[in-house]
Image: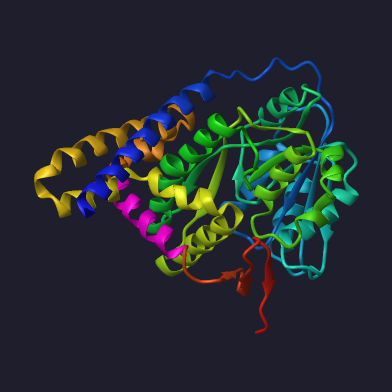
């Protein structure tokens, strides 16, 4: 019975692989529209510490080939080392209007949302781009987003991302998973149900859309505020798209313990944001299931070989064709190890209700909201 159950799960996972390949092809078939206007844009950049590559990340926004944009930065306290980097770039690019805001301690759990709220209040323009500090882009990024917002029904666009790790082996392993497994889930969701969510690293939105969803006050208590913002926009009748522009998400260099905490936090948050979707993630990863089947029935080893072929095809479609990722092309042999790690962290996501985030411990509620625990 166990072997038959595993065989059924592997078969379902192979169907999912086929869906991923089709979804990747459909995404690639969409071409960004020709630019007909260039509305002014406000770029919001929450900062927290001088992480690796921060100056290069921020510089990529100052060097946008776009006629009218401003950049706003927000830090929590006046001693944040990111301030010196931001100020240096502001002096180097005097032609780009920029503002630095010191927010103080946030009055609610999600400090990033508080920073975004403060920056939005100071922003001058109606097209808003929210980009994390670890995002790096090419000079055409704002122009691409502006062209997509030529559709008046579009309220929000979220950028797919290519994860770029630092020197850490564990961060490299995570990047392989993000660029082959995670993006596949996003593409399949887009194809089957449309974009009813957003991805955190970079989101563009109309000010009107943000106002209609209740502003940042509506998501201040959520850990996965990006997912909720996209969901609320759709519920208010706005269109949400997966942008044609792929950003670089510089995920840094974490040792095993820090990386494990990060991945468990992500899985626990996802389980509460979309419970049934989280259960369905079992089918997104065929190799662990196929290897378990192989262990249960050694004579059925050809199933594992077929699963490996399907998994390789998904990696080519997602990391290669969609993300243009050189990491997976170079370190493809890490995919089975990453899939095993991903499967274990997925299991771990079913247990525990607390997370550690930026040195503070929080309790995750069943509805996806979180609260700070007393130290």
Say whether residue 345 is magenta. Answer: yes
Q: 17 or 264: nearer the eye?
A: 17
Model colouring = rainbow
Above or below: residue 260 compared with residue 174:
below
Rendered image quadrant of residue 12: top left
For residue 253, side relative to residue 307 (left or right): right
Q: 157 or 142: nearer the eye?
A: 157
The stretch of residues the image draws in magenta is 334-349
Residue 317 visible to an observer of this rendering: no
Above or below: residue 255 compared with residue 28:
below
Above or below: residue 16 compared with residue 250:
above
Residue 94 placement (x, y as % from top left): 82, 41
Residue 200 visible to an observer of this rendering: yes
Residue farthest toward the left in the current orientation of the protein: 299
Q: Quadrant of the C terminus?
A: bottom right
Say whether residue 309 is magenta. Answer: no
Residue 206 placement (x, y as % from top left): 82, 36
Query: Number of callouts in the render?
Result: 0
Q: Residue at x 81, y 24 (%)?
A: 152
Residue 178 placement (x, y as % from top left): 46, 45
Magenta stretch secondary structure, dominant: helix
Q: 71 or 192: nearer the eye?
A: 192
Q: Residue at x 64, y 55 (%)?
A: 224
Residue farthest toward the front in the current orientation of the protein: 1
Q: 17 or 174: nearer the eye?
A: 17
Above or below: residue 203 compared with residue 243:
below
Residue 171 placement (x, y as % from top left): 43, 55
Residue farthest toward the bottom in the current orientation of the protein: 375
Rendered image quadrant of residue 307: top left
Q: Residue at x 47, y 69 (%)?
A: 351
Q: Residue at x 64, y 67 (%)?
A: 365
């Amino acid at each position: 019975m166990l072997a038959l159950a595993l065989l059924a799960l592997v078969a379902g996972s192979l169907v999912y692989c086929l869906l991923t390949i089709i979804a990747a092809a459909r995404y690639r078939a969409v071409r960004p529209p020709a630019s007909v206007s260039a509305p002014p844009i406000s770029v919001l950049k929450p900062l927290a510490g001088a992480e690796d590559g921060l100056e290069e990340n921020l510089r990529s926004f100052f060097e946008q080939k776009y006629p009218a944009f401003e950049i706003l930065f927000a830090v929590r306290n006046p001693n944040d080392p990111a301030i010196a980097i931001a100020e240096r770039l502001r002096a180097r690019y005097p032609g780009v209007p920029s503002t630095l805001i010191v927010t103080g301690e946030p009055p609610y759990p999600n400090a990033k949302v508080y920073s975004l709220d403060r920056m939005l209040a100071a922003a001058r323009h109606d097209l808003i781009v929210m980009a994390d500090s670890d995002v790096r882009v090419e000079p055409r990024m704002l122009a691409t987003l502006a062209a997509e917002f030529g559709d008046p029904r579009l309220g929000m666009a979220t950028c797919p991302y290519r994860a770029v790790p630092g020197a850490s082996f564990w961060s490299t392993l995570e990047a392989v998973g993000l660029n082959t497994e995670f993006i596949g889930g996003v593409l399949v969701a887009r194809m089957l149900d449309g974009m009813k969510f957003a991805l955190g690293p970079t989101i563009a939105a109309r000010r009107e859309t943000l106002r209609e969803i209740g502003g940042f006050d509506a998501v201040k208590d959520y850990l996965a505020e990006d997912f909720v913002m996209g969901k609320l926009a759709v519920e208010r009748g706005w269109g949400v798209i997966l942008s044609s522009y792929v950003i670089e998400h510089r995920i840094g260099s974490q040792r095993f313990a820090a990386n494990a905490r990060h991945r468990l936090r992500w899985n626990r948050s996802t389980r509460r944001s979309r419970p049934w979707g989280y259960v369905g993630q079992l089918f997104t990863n065929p190799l662990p299931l196929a290897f378990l089947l192989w262990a249960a029935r050694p004579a059925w080893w050809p199933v594992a070989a077929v699963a490996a072929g399907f998994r390789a095809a998904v990696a080519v479609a997602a990391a290669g064709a969609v993300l243009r990722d050189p990491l997976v092309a170079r370190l493809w042999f890490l995919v089975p190890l990453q899939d095993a790690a991903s499967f274990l962290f997925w299991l771990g996501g079913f247990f525990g209700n607390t997370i550690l985030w930026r040195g503070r411990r929080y309790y995750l509620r069943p509805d996806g909201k979180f609260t700070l625990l007393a130290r």
